[in-house]
Image: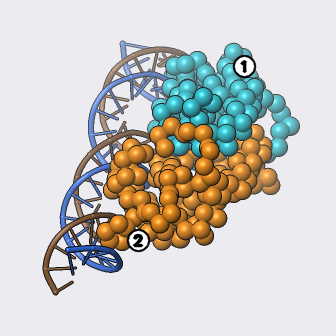
Chain colours: A cyan, B orange, C brown, D blue
Amino acid sequence: MFSKSCQYAIRATIYLAMHQEEGKNLGVKEIATSLDVPQQFLAKILQQLSRQNLVSSIKGPNGGFYLSPENKLNSLLQIIECIDGPLTLNSCVLGLPQCSSVTPCPLHFNFFEYREKMRQTLGATSISNFSNPGLPPYPTY
Amino acid sequence: MFSKSCQYAIRATIYLAMHQEEGKNLGVKEIATSLDVPQQFLAKILQQLSRQNLVSSIKGPNGGFYLSPENKLNSLLQIIECIDGPLTLNSCVLGLPQCSSVTPCPLHFNFFEYREKMRQTLGATSISNFSNPGLPPYPTY
DNA sequence: TATTGACATGATTTTGAAAACATAAGTAGT
DNA sequence: ACTACTTATGTTTTCAAAATCATGTCAATA
Ligand code: FES
Ligand code: FES
């Protein structure tokens, strides 16, 4: 459903939201180790998010990544589309060039409704949702 | 969501269901041309389906692929799982090793319900559904 | 039974995502 | 200024899916 890059992006962002403390930045090393993903690869992904202002970063000693208040207002969908592109959850499940209710493929109406709801949920879920304490302990997070 | 192999498999099977006439077999060449997919690649996929008795085939002149009455009772989900494996629509969207409501990832409950419904729909849709005449004219089919 | 037309199977090549490598650039402390 | 630390950027390598190539097997027909 999502590329590995995208999965890493989501997990890293949520990790940032869950583990961020006031004024403390998290390094790629720590995040990559905690999530058990390739460090250099994750670095690229975080930089891609950073370029689009979805996460914030500071270089140098004590540097690292963090979420600004503004960053936390972004939705999961923005993270996803930043990495996998705007066609994610919008293109034909059978790979046909266009997907719409006007020229539907045989499976279009089997998926459209649920896919839309997924998109809607993801768009309505802001990163700040994951920074609340008292959330259940997620595995590998 | 599905691999290209799987998309081709679904499209080819539906094509068979829609274009099959009594006692007439459809060759890989015709199917591949109609669907605009690589012929040799599609051949492999159809053979994979054939080995699991999801489609039927006959060699030699006038040979080709067709759907036996038994074949038509299979569900789309069987086609999908034959190609992409049983974990399709069952594994964690974030790529975590196991997906269950007992050890859910942060996105589990955002997807679980809709994913289940997709599976359910696919499992309940038999191939014979596509052989009824009077269906809308699908693009590239 | 020879030929032809189709599926079947194995090996190989291509392609792009995933991962690793190398180096630059910026920041904090000494 | 110098060093150490961390993000940023560009290049290269790895790997599996996708696609192709080459050859084998089977059935209809003349
Ligand atoms: S056209 Fe295929 S899913 Fe919409
Ligand atoms: S655990 Fe991630 S989707 Fe179920």
> Could one spot residue A91 in this view of the protein?
yes
Residue A72 x %, y % = 71, 22
In terms of depth relative to the viewer, which is nearer, A8 or C10? C10
Q: Is residue A124 above or below residue B27?
A: above
* Secondary structure of residue under mark 2: strand
Crowd rating for badge 1 (residues with CA inside 10 Å; few <14, some 14–19, many 20+): some
Q: Is residue B58 above or below residue A7?
A: below
Residue B65 x %, y % = 44, 63
Q: Nearer the viewer, mark 1 or mark 2?
A: 2
Residue hosting label 1: A73
On screen, residue A112 versus residue C5, left or right, reads right
Label 2 beta carbon within 8 A of ligand 1 = no
> Could one spot residue A28 in this view of the protein?
no
In terms of depth relative to the viewer, which is nearer, B107 or C3? C3
Residue A51 x %, y % = 52, 19
**Subunit ID for the residue under disc 1:** A
Label 1 beta carbon within 8 A of ligand 2 = no
Q: From mark 1 to mark 2, how far is it between C-alphas?
A: 59 Å
Marks 1/2 in contact by CB < 8 Å: the verdict is no
**Subunit ID for the residue under disc 2:** B
Q: Amino acid at mark 2?
A: Ile
Mark sitting on residue B58: 2
Q: Quadrant of residue B64?
A: bottom left
Residue B77 x %, y % = 63, 57
Crowd rating for badge 2 (residues with CA inside 10 Å; few <14, some 14–19, many 20+): few
